[in-house]
Image (cartoon, helix red, strand yellow):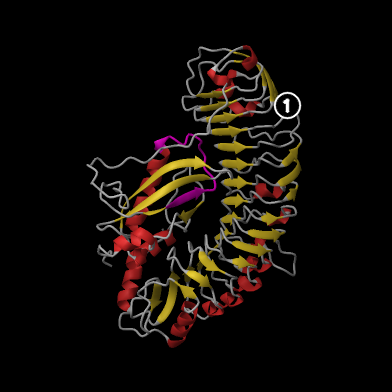
Amino acid sequence: MGSGLPIFLLITCLQVLVIAAVTDSSDLSALNAVKSNWMNTPPSWIGSDPCGGGWEGIGCTGSRITSIILTGMGLSGTLTGNIGDFPELQTLDLSQNKGLTGTLPSKIVNLKKLENLFLVNCNFSGPIPDGIGSLTQLVSLSIASNSFYGPIPPSIGKISNLSLLDLTDNKLSGTIPVSNGTSPGLDLLLKAEHFHLGKNQFTGGIPPNLFSSNMKLLHVLFDSNQLNGSLPSTLELVQTLEVIRLDRNSLTGPILFNFTNLSNLSELYLSNNKFSGSIPDLSGKNLTYVDMSNNSFDASLIPPWFSSLQSMTSLIMERTQLQGPINATLFSPVQLQSIVLSNNQLNGTLDLGTNYGSKLVLVDLQNNFIGEFVQGTGYKENLLLQGNPFCQKVKSDYCIAPLQKNSSYATPTENCVASSCNAQQPPSQNCNCANPITGILHFRSFSFSDFQNGSYYIPLQAAMMEAFKSDQLPVDSISLCDPFKDADDYLEVRLDVCPSGVYFFNRTGFSVITSQLNNLTFFKHPHPFGPFFFTLNDNYFTGKAKIEQKLVLDIDL
């Protein structure tokens, strides 16, 4: 969250301080040019003094525009080259405006003081400007969930202060650029903590010299691309790593290292590749989530390390050529919640024993060669044995094909009596009628699989509320509900954010809150939750909500 004034109070103070200021004429001209290509701009955008006239979403220092935050305003149109004509601009956030289309103008590289560029979940397309590396003050570059195409500009490697690089869910292609003496590359980003490149069309190998011991990376997320070649051992040099996602690529060859030096690594996703050779030995690690399913490893017995990782919550090894009997110690790790060993060649008699972990909610052994099952162990959770010879001999609930079930979990409300509210203004967690900001938190990694377990979501709810209060944002309460794992193995959780004291957020409160929900450092994530992004469910300022909003007061700034 950082130090200094809370963000909401800071924005308010800046607006007050410049109330008598006259906006710089060149900034005014640039903003009017940008505005002319947009529809659905905020109603307060009238007059000729954005700084002194309180234009919503526009932040100023003195007479100069220093921030444009219009998250989720329902804007439509294109971004003109005039967006590059704000020499003092530090933050540009146009996220969650699906009506924004077209290309990112090359003149955006003129914003030499820009520190934060957020264009998440819009409809921009075209290439990323080659000269984007001239934005040397950038700390956060997040343009996820658009339709950008073409290669990653090597010049990004010149942004030495960059912490977050999020290019997820676009149509980007080509290879991952690294420096070669004449051209920069991503290996030069020594302050970067987040390489989020998943759900694109990148090809080629993962360059060995992409990683070095001087890096501070926490997350390497390259999932759902077309990367090939071997897994570079240089990955072990980055000892700060916490999450590695390389699943859903075409990586090949044996894994020639055991992640020995990565003492902070908690989540490892290597599924749906073409790895061969021996299953890597992960003994002695603090891993909580491992998925190496759907690879071409050598046939082997269940490795001893499967039952030795006492921090493990989820072990997923479907179609990994496992064979032989299953020892009851496999189910004994105290934190284990899910073990999935389906579609292998496991055989013999299954005995869960009596020392299985108390948190174990799923044992999936479908489509193996298990001939017998020792019942009467007292295990009452989900045990899936369909497709084994055992099921041809007996009728058992364990042999019925499982139904896909979504969690109906919701964080509990306070101990109060819910107000009588209409359909558009459901009661908040504090039982006040409100029109909440509603959307989805998408967690790109998570280290648990018991999605009904409220002990995970309550700390998440508390951490987010603490951040909202610390930044003095006008939030009464938040609720989290309906978690489920999507087709990309991301965890989706519905989020409702209710306004404080009134029925509706005004535009300034709304845009600041939704902008912060795009900021990975907004709150300290409780351990099971990894990096995330947020998407709005709909436009807050249109439809029924807009009609009803006319009947109530806005939040008083």
Work out which residue is located at the far bottom of the displayed protein and give it. Answer: 25
Residue 70's image quarter?
A: bottom left
**In the rendered image, the vertical position of residue 144 relative to residue 303, given as above or below:** below
Residue 125, given in percent of the width and then of the height, sits at 61, 66
Instruction: Name which residue lies at 32% across and 66% down.
Output: 9
Total marks in image: 1
Q: Image quadrant for the N terminus?
A: bottom left
Residue 517, given in percent of the width and then of the height, sits at 44, 57
**Secondary structure beneath label 1:** loop
Q: Nearer the viewer, residue 310 or 292?
A: 292
Q: Nearer the viewer, residue 554 or 321?
A: 554
Residue 312 visible to the viewer: no
Instruction: Name which residue lies at 56% across and 56% down.
Output: 193
The stretch of residues the image draws in magenta is 439-455
Q: Amino acid at mark 1?
A: Ser
Residue 184, given in percent of the width and then of the height, sits at 69, 67
Q: Could you tell whether 328 is left or right of 475 in the image?
A: right
Residue 69, given in percent of the width and then of the height, sits at 43, 68
**In the rendered image, the vertical position of residue 387 relative to residue 538, given as above or below:** above
Query: Label 1 neighbourhood size at 10 Å, few (<14), some (14-19), many (20+)?
Result: some
Residue 306's image quarter?
A: top right
Which residue in the structure is indicated by mark 1? 300
Q: Image quadrant for the C terminus?
A: bottom left
**In the rendered image, the vertical position of residue 257 relative to residue 442, given as above or below:** above
**In the rendered image, the vertical position of residue 470 relative to residue 419, given as above or below:** below
Is residue 440 located in the magenta-colored stretch of the structure? Answer: yes
Residue 107's image quarter?
A: bottom right
Is residue 533 located in the magenta-colored stretch of the structure? Answer: no
